[in-house]
Image (cartoon, rainbow, N blue to C red):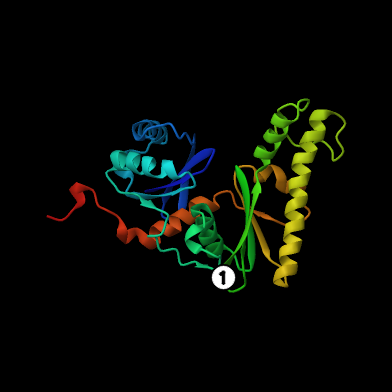
Amino acid sequence: MILVIDIGNTNTVLGGMEGEQLQFTLRIQSDRLKTADEYLLTIKGLLELQGVTPAQIEGGIISSVVPELKNVMGRAMKKLTGRQFLVVGSGVETGLRIKTDDPSKLGSDLVVDAVAALAKYQPPLVFFDMGTATTLSVIDGQGNYLGGMIIPGLRLSVDSLSARAAQLPYINLDEPEQLIGTNTISCMQAGAIYSNAAMIDGLLERVEAELGGPVAAIATGGLIAKVLPYCRRQVHYDENLMLEGLQILYRRNSGNQTPRKEDAPC
């Protein structure tokens, strides 16, 4: 089994992969104040609930958009498993042709999503990842990563509105009962969900106009499932795109793994 770890700004998601099959997922808070030992204890306990021991983990890979947690998590996993986990970055072979101004600055989360999207879908394609920020990425018909957009996230936007407007409460992102709200909360819920759905529909139309033809649309991320039912365009929901991309990158780069001491040749 390999452990794939996606460290986001809000949550960290861990997946246990056997071959190409995702056996389980675990979700913990991305806490910048936690030490490697604290992460070790948390993850070890969650793995035990899945019936998984550290000896069963043959290796792993980490993607992090939180720079200070990348090394912390790496140390935690080294202590837990005896393995040096791969970290998505400049030393990892991705196979991507990145056409942005500075390919080295492309976020590891976008790299991983793009690797998985190209492995699973026919380009040209657009994929949305809706987390703390919402990102849009565009891959052309030749498989080149062209670039995209970074947009304030759904939850972040709603919370910012509540924080800055004295008479607007903090709300749950429940499904709106109708397009036109009839009270403050229903107006905010409808505004949040329908505006994001309209954004996705509108951006897909504009990207297709720029590329000169239709694109496949894929969406992932913790909040996207709340929005997709309200989209008019067909958008494929791929819940585990990031974890599958990490698994692909691990297999491509597994020759870089450091063995446990007991596995090393004499």
* 233 horizontally vs 254: left or right: right
* 44 horizontally vs 215: left or right: left
Which quadrant of the structure image shows residue 191?
A: top right
Measured as percent of width and height from the top left, residue 36 is found at: 35, 35
* 50 horizontally vs 263: left or right: right
Measured as percent of width and height from the top left, residue 124 is found at: 64, 68
* Identity of the residue drawn at 42% across and 33% down: 46
Could you say whether the residue bearing mark 1 is in a helix, strand or loop? loop
Depth order, front residue of 178/148? 148
Residue lying furthest left: 266
Number of numbered discs overlaid on the protein picture: 1
* Identity of the residue drawn at 33% across and 45% down: 57
Neighbor class of circle 1 (other Cα within 10 Å; few <14, some 14-19, many 20+) is: some
Judging by the rendered image, the residue that carries numbered circle 1 is 143
Look at the image and tell me in which quarter the C terminus lies: bottom left
* Identity of the residue drawn at 60% across and 46% down: 221
Depth order, front residue of 152/7? 152
Depth order, front residue of 124/158? 158
* Identity of the residue drawn at 42% across and 36% down: 50
Which quadrant of the structure image shows residue 218?
A: bottom right
Give, as a three-letter code, the residue at label 1.
Answer: Gly
Measured as percent of width and height from the top left, residue 4 is found at: 43, 48
Measured as percent of width and height from the top left, residue 49 is found at: 41, 32
